[in-house]
Image (tube, helix red, strand yellow):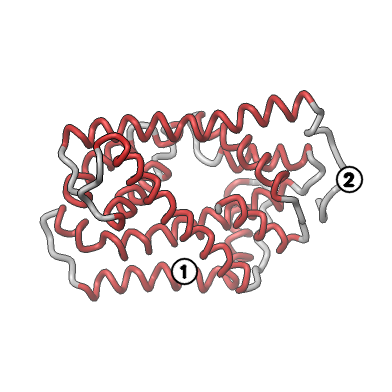
Amino acid sequence: MLIESWRRLLTAWSVHLSFGDAATLWLVSSLARYLPGAGLQIGALGVLARERGVSGVAAASAAIVNTMVNVATGVAVILVFGGRGLAAASGRRAPDAALAAIGLAAVGALALLPVVLPALGRVAARVTGRDVSLASLPARLVLVAAAGNTAGWLLYGLAFRTLSGALFGPPTGAASGYTAVYTASYLWGLFAFAVPAGLGAQEFALSLLMPPLAALPPAQTAVLTVAARLWRTVLETAPAALLLVYARAHDRFTPRPPHGTI
């Protein structure tokens, strides 16, 4: 879902890729997440795109936009499926109006993306000293990206619950709780910029949130936390490594005529 959302966003920069090419670029660049430092995957994506004759600026800019949409939809998913549970776990009662306001703020941020992106691009270019072109996006593309990212969060949650069921038998917690927990832990790890792939940060969030939101005992939570990290690492690195070997062996990353403008 994330790859397709990014591929659709690229069309705003007049770049058109097949899903296979987009998946190769995305998955191979994701290996950079396992290095310490912020934004390395986006930088790697731009470099790999240039080697394929695709605008590196467009690839990185579309990835930045997709990340913004991913975070906004993730916040909305957390609030919808686990807002009250998170408040209860913290020992505080969050008013429904406050949860609704935060959710509306996330939706509003998505709605404003087509308007504010050019200004954000200028700010990012000044801060980083690099060429960042955040084009004004059609509202249709923002909606497509939001739908794709939301579906991605829901599928992550269902997969996480399925993993729990495979380890411990039929889960006692609802799918909504597992979805909220996984989404919150993923975003927590995403913002742990100095930690490779959110290692440790995501596990801390899972251990904190699983018992109250997914009704899983602490001992089983510990096992599931380790299993989820191992399984996710395999799923992220194994396909990327195989694609990289295949691409190098078949000279897939040699320069090609550009797709769109560079």
Farthest residue, direction left = 91
Residue 229 vertical position relative to residue 6 in the rendered view, above or below: above
* Separation (CA) of disc 2 from disc 1: 36 Å
Which residue corresponds to the image point at 39% horizontal and 71% vertical from the top-left? 105
Asked if residue 13 lies left or right of residue 226, the reply is right
Judged from the image, the secondary structure of the residue bearing numbered disc 1 is helix
Asked if residue 53 lies left or right of residue 96, the reply is right
Asked if residue 1 lies left or right of residue 192, the reply is right
Q: Where is residue 18 in the image (x, y as percent from the top left)?
A: 74, 51
Q: Which numbered tag is attached to residue 109?
A: 1
In this rendered view, identify the residue nearer to me: 111 or 236: 236
In this rendered view, identify the residue nearer to me: 130 or 169: 169
Q: Where is residue 237 in the image (x, y as percent from the top left)?
A: 54, 30
Work out whether mark 2 precedes mark 1 in sequence or the reverse, and give the earlier one: 1
In this rendered view, identify the residue nearer to me: 38 or 2: 2
Which residue corresponds to the image point at 56% horizontal and 62% vertical from the top-left? 145
Three-letter code for the amino acid on which mark 1 is drawn: Ala
Which residue corresponds to the image point at 82% horizontal and 55% vertical from the top-left? 260
Q: Position of residue 44 (x, y in %)?
A: 64, 37
In this rendered view, identify the residue nearer to me: 43 or 258: 258
How busy is the neighbourhood of tag 1: few (under 14 within 10 Å), some, or many (20 plus)?
some
Residue 248 vertical position relative to residue 26 in the rendered view, above or below: above
Farthest residue, direction front = 169
Three-letter code for the amino acid on which mark 2 is drawn: Pro
Q: Position of residue 196 (x, y in %)?
A: 45, 31
Name the residue tied to disc 2. Answer: 257
Farthest residue, direction right = 257
Farthest residue, direction bottom = 97
> Which image quarter: residue 48?
top right
Judged from the image, the secondary structure of the residue bearing numbered disc 2 is loop
Residue 101 vertical position relative to residue 162 in the rendered view, above or below: below
Q: Which numbered tag is attached to residue 173?
A: none
